Image (tube, rainbow, N blue to C red):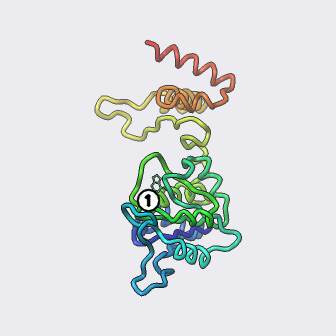
């Protein structure tokens, strides 16, 4: 997969692409990440990329002609162009999975007070990462790239994301590693028992328990099977006391 990030601040991405899993995914050829500096597409001698808002008011607005030239020069009919904006549809794991199937994902990052409204006509969709305002789209583009890249084949072990929180609609079960006892807290005995059937049931039940306690909204959307219904009944009883 190719990810192209159109930004005024390409240096913000150095840590992101130079470390850890993302770095390894790039080295393995799982993904190619290109950073494109929107400012290169400015044609005036001061390399302006923004201007004051028509009608007046505070701040600066990103110019449509500069952004359009940048998009045209770096995309083709196979590109899927996403604009980073707090006005977009709220991002989630389902959208991450959808974007991870693309050949070429283009993330357009804004800065200043916003984009000239006409820029919207050059993008395929608008995405927000939550109900808060960032100074620019760069951090949001990293959030989206990170969550998409880890879903690509060979980026991480497949089983690692099949059990992710959200991908099956429930929060993930609790995990432990050695030491077996720390500061008076013990790893649950069942996880040390070697009984795979019991471990699986424990994990399913704790996954349901967490979702019930922390994100009941997810549980409302989740289709329980017979075993899960029984486990949830037990949890509701246990949590009453
Ligand atoms: Cl995608 N961009 C900006 N600037 N702010 C945001 C956002 C995106 N998502 C939430 N807040």
Q: In the image, residue 18 lies at what x, y percent?
A: 43, 68
Residue 78 vs residue 169, the one in the foreground: 78
On the question of residue 160 being in view, the answer is: no
Q: In the image, residue 210 lies at what x, y percent?
A: 49, 30
Is ligand 1 closer than 8 angstroms to the Cβ of mark 1? yes
Q: Quadrant of residue 152?
A: bottom right
Q: Is residue 68 above or below residue 113?
A: below
Mark 1 element type: helix
Residue on which disc 1 sits: 139
On the question of residue 121 being in view, the answer is: yes
Q: Residues within 10 Å of mark 1 (few under 14, many from 20)?
A: some
Of all residues, the one furthest to the bottom in this rendering is: 45
- Going by the image, does 86 lie left or right of 186? right
**Residue at horizontal 48%, vertical 81%?**
42
- Going by the image, does 58 lie left or right of 145? left
Q: Is residue 75 above or below residue 16?
A: below
**Residue at horizontal 61%, vertical 50%?**
95
**Residue at horizontal 53%, vertical 54%?**
147
């Amino acid at each position: 997969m190719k990810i192209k990030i159109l930004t005024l601040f390409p240096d913000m991405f150095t840590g992101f692409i130079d470390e850890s899993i993302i770095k390894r995914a790039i080295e393995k050829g799982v993904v190619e990440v290109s950073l494109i500096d929107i400012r290169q597409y400015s044609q005036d001698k001061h390399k302006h990329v923004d201007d004051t808002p028509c009608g007046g008011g505070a701040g600066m607005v990103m110019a449509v002609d500069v952004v359009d030239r940048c998009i045209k020069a770096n995309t083709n009919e196979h590109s899927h162009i996403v604009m980073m904006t707090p006005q977009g549809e709220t991002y989630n794991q389902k959208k991450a999975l959808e974007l991870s199937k693309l050949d070429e994902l283009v993330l357009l990052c804004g800065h200043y007070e916003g984009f000239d409204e006409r820029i919207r006509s050059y993008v395929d969709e608008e995405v927000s990462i939550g109900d808060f305002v960032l100074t620019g789209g760069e951090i949001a583009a990293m959030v989206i790239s990170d969550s998409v890249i880890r879903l690509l084949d060979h980026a991480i072990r497949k089983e690692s994301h099949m059990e992710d929180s959200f991908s099956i609609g429930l929060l993930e079960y609790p995990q432990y590693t050695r030491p077996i006892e720390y500061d008076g807290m013990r790893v649950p005995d069942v996880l040390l028992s070697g009984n795979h059937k019991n471990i699986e049931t424990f994990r399913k039940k704790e996954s349901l328990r967490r979702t019930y306690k922390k994100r009941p909204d997810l549980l409302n959307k989740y289709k329980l099977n017979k075993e899960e219904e029984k486990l949830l009944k037990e949890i509701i009883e246990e949590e009453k006391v």
